[in-house]
Image (cartoon, coloured by chain):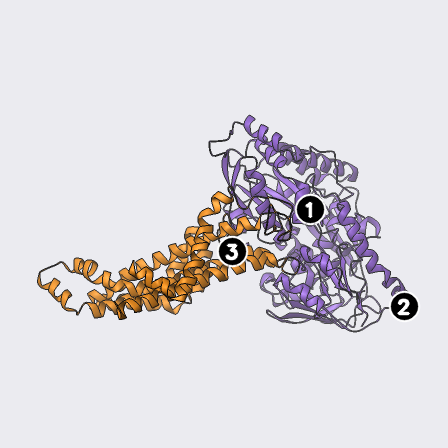
Chain colours: A orange, B purple
């Protein structure tokens, strides 16, 4: 709880927290406010924003409600962002801990593997993966996680390397705890916080990669995504710029919110360490 | 010749644009056409094989038709809608077993060698019949080509082949390539498949991958004082959104094949110096078709297919997806084909209640979640409009309780999924109607076609009755009887719905008004442009 107070005391934390709260609210309320399929044809096509009270943000080329699409798109973006980041942190932490704790040949092998993944640009890896497997929400999440786990792995390993030399780990060894138990119960929990601060960067990146994949037509076509909305709107960019601009703004706000919240978390953690 | 049918609204628009486009030139027409200058046009693709004798497709023709010529070209005024090119006359025998072509004299290939009947015989027997995607169908019974002299070629068929079909096939299928260039080695691997050698008004000069194609004037072209232009540059602009900008910035003179998105036409038509032209594509009608996989038990039931047809609001599709630049379809032959089209077929007006009743009757009642059954829907990725129609179709089906899941693929994966693996329930395809149902239309519904043939019936539909009509028509030499058989064919397809025809559209050309003689034949974008000139 103190951690949260520290978090809210930073300006970044307040701003980020507010933006994220609003976005999370939109995501949660979307099915209530806009029940049914957001891709359903709701009104006359190509209505301008603020022209018709029933569809406040206007409609796209097929007559779909832009506001409903936007709200449901929030769900996809957040879902992909959180799921991909969750998977990446989990896998990364596991690999990093194993590498750092076991050392020797295991460490070498796992770290070379990590580097192999790091040499391929994240977006290209995701692009290749989705083009081969075929676009769906699950593959998009896996594709993003596939390139995002390397950073948490390296940080976890670095933390573990320092932690495993601490006295309490030596004590655990001395009382005869199983190495796996030491790794999971003593080392990992203490190595995790720095990895978690990285999570905000991963979430933001994941949202951007998802949008880029959808923009290229490699998102799940049965779900609304902001990237997909921008891609659709791009065809009529000169005639109806709002169709691209509105989801673009949503994307910028979300990523900004996640970054700010991440900054706030780092700051809060530093304050807690500095002045308990 | 067929003229293109539009909705009233777009017709008005089009007429206005045409009036605007002719108002100025009428004065200029009196003036002499100016020779010289360079025409820069937008190209959206760079085909791997540019040889129109092997790959008869519009993407290839767009560039190659200026270099390699067919025996005859489509025309608004000519007899039977044809104008002579490398052939000056053509005549079919009464038994349907031979067609005699008189060839143009004094024509030379771009490398200086004379053009003779041997080139026509070689192209027909060694390229069109065995290698060409469409020639395989039309020339399947071509046995020999006799060459009594250098300027006569007599096509001999083993079975009666309708002269009407051969005539209708002349513009797209009969690009003549030089025998002396292709006779040695494998034809498919010949370098002249990309560095074209032809008889046309322009010579192939160079291709910079990802940047441009350059064609230059053929000074020894057979038509006197043609062509007018010194060179044509095809600027490769794969991004559709950039063509409009390039036109406005005067970086290009012309964008054909709807390279300017339909949604931009309204705006760009108001720009000074730019005209929007919907003429010139009448012989290249694209059809928006729902392909159906009859292996799915639900879709094998005619009532379900009828329900799907009733669930689609064709007028909405024409108005919103095509913004009026299309016409609603009634069957497998487009309305603009005066030769074969009949409106006297089963119609499926938009009627949700009827669709639901048909589905109930077929035994597919709504479950507790409001869904009857689920389908995989694969929209072809080639056009914005096919993708958008896919989005619309999903909603239209949802409205009658059919849950359609969209599957997006790139072009290659889509071809494989639909035409080889049959991994679809319904697909959205844009087949081309080429002036005669036998060229590329009957293949869409005919039974017994091997897996992997693109743009053919891969939905497992197999009807003895329909196949019989198709077989009879393909051998009927009497033109009136053959036309009648194709009317029967349209009726049968509309009644049985092996596929659902939704709309048909031609493309739009957007050009600077300095370009003259645009869209003056029904295949203008893929014709030779010998009389096109730029008023600089």
Q: Residues within 10 Å of mark 2 (few under 14, many from 20)?
A: few
Report which residue position mark 3 lands on. A226
Gap between marks 2 and 1 measured at Cα: 40 Å
Give the image location of residue B140, x and y in percent.
Answer: 65, 47
Label 2 SS: loop
Gap between marks 1 and 3 measured at Cα: 26 Å
Q: Which marked residue is nearer to the observer: mark 2 or mark 1?
A: 1
- Who comes first in sequence, dot 2 or dot 1? 2
Report which residue position mark 2 lands on. B31
Give the image location of residue A221, x and y in percent.
Answer: 51, 50
Left or right: residue B315 compared with residue A243: right
Report which residue position mark 1 lands on. B319
Q: Residues within 10 Å of mark 1 (few under 14, many from 20)?
A: some
Pick the quarter of the image with the N terminus of chain A: bottom left
Q: Is residue B443 visible?
A: yes
Pick the quarter of the image with the C terminus of chain A: bottom left
Q: Which marked residue is nearer to the observer: mark 1 or mark 3?
A: 3
In this view, B514 is above or below A241? below
Gap between marks 3 and 2 measured at Cα: 54 Å
Q: A97 and B489: which one is in front? A: A97
Q: Is residue B463 visible?
A: no
Q: The disc numbered 3 marks a residue on which chain?
A: A
């Amino acid at each position: 709880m103190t951690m949260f107070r520290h978090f809210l005391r930073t300006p970044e934390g307040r701003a980020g927290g507010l933006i994220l709260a609003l976005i999370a609210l939109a995501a949660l309320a979307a099915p209530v406010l806009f029940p049914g399929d957001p891709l359903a044809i709701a009104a006359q096509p190509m209505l301008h924003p603020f022209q018709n009270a029933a569809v406040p943000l206007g409609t796209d080329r097929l007559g779909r409600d832009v506001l409903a699409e936007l709200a449901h798109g929030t769900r996809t973006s957040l879902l992909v962002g959180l799921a991909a980041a969750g998977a990446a942190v989990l896998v990364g932490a596991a690999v990093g801990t194993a590498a750092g704790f076991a050392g020797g040949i295991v460490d070498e092998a796992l770290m070379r593997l990590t580097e192999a993944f790091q040499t391929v640009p994240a977006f290209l890896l995701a692009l290749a993966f989705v083009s081969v497997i075929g676009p769906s929400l699950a593959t998009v999440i896996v594709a993003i996680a596939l390139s995002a786990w390397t950073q948490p792995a390296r940080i976890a390993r670095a933390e573990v390397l320092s932690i495993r030399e601490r006295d309490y780990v030596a004590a655990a060894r001395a009382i005869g705890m199983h190495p796996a138990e030491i790794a999971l119960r003593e080392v990992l929990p203490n190595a995790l916080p720095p990895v978690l601060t990285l999570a905000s960067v991963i979430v933001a990146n994941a949202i951007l990669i998802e949008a880029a994949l959808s923009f290229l037509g490699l998102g799940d076509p049965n779900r609304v995504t902001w990237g997909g909305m921008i891609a659709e709107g791009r065809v009529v960019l000169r005639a109806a710029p709002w169709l691209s601009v509105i989801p673009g703004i949503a994307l910028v706000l979300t990523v900004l919110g996640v970054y700010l919240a991440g900054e706030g978390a780092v700051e809060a953690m530093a304050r807690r360490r500095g002045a308990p | 010749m067929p003229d293109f049918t539009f909705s009233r609204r777009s017709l008005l628009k089009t007429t206005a644009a045409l009036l605007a486009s002719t108002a100025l030139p009428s004065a200029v027409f009196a003036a002499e056409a100016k020779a010289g200058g360079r025409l820069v046009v937008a190209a959206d693709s760079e085909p791997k094989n540019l040889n129109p004798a092997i790959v008869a497709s519009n993407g290839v023709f767009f560039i190659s038709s200026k270099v390699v010529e067919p025996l005859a070209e489509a025309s608004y005024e000519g007899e039977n809608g044809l104008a002579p090119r490398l052939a000056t006359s053509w005549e079919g025998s009464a038994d349907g077993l031979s067609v005699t072509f008189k060839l143009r004299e004094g024509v030379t290939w771009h490398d200086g060698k004379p053009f003779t009947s041997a080139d026509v015989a070689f192209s027909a027997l060694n390229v069109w019949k065995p290698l060409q995607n469409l020639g395989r169908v039309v020339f399947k019974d071509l046995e020999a080509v006799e060459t009594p002299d250098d300027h006569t070629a007599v096509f001999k068929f083993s079975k009666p082949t309708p002269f009407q079909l051969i005539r209708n096939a002349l513009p797209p299928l009969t690009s003549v390539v030089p025998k002396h260039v292709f006779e040695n080695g494998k034809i498919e691997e010949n370098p002249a498949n990309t560095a074209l050698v032809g008889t046309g008004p322009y010579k192939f000069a160079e291709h910079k991958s990802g940047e441009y194609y350059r064609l230059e004037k053929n000074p020894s072209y057979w038509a006197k004082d043609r062509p007018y232009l010194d060179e044509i540059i095809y600027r490769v602009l794969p991004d559709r959104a950039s063509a409009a900008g390039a036109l406005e910035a005067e970086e290009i003179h012309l964008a054909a094949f709807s390279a300017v998105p339909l949604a931009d036409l309204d705006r760009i038509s108001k720009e000074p110096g730019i005209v929007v032209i919907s003429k010139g594509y009448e012989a290249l009608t694209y059809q928006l078709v729902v392909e159906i996989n009859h292996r799915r038990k639900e879709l094998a039931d005619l009532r379900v297919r009828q329900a799907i047809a009733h669930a689609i609001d064709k007028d909405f599709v024409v108005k919103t997806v095509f913004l009026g630049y299309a016409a609603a379809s009634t069957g497998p032959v487009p309305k603009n084909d005066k030769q074969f089209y009949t409106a006297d077929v089963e119609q499926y007006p938009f009627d949700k209640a009827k669709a639901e009743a048909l589905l109930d009757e077929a035994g597919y009642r709504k479950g507790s979640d409001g869904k009857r059954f689920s389908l995989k829907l694969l929209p072809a990725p080639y056009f914005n409009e096919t993708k958008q129609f896919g989005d619309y179709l999903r909603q239209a089906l949802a409205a009658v309780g059919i849950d359609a899941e969209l599957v997006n693929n790139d072009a290659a994966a889509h071809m494989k999924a639909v035409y080889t693996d049959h991994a679809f329930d319904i697909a959205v395809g844009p087949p081309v109607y080429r002036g005669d149902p036998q060229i590329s239309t009957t293949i869409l519904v005919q039974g017994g076609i091997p897996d992997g043939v693109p743009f053919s019936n891969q939905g497992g539909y197999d009807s003895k009755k329909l196949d019989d009509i198709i077989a009879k028509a393909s051998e009927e030499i009497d033109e009136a009887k053959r036309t009648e058989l194709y009317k029967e064919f349209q009726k049968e397809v509309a009644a049985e719905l092996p596929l659902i025809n939704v709309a048909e559209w031609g493309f739009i050309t957007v050009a600077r008004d300095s370009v003259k003689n645009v869209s003056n034949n029904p295949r203008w974008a893929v014709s030779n442009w010998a009389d096109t000139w730029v008023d600089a």
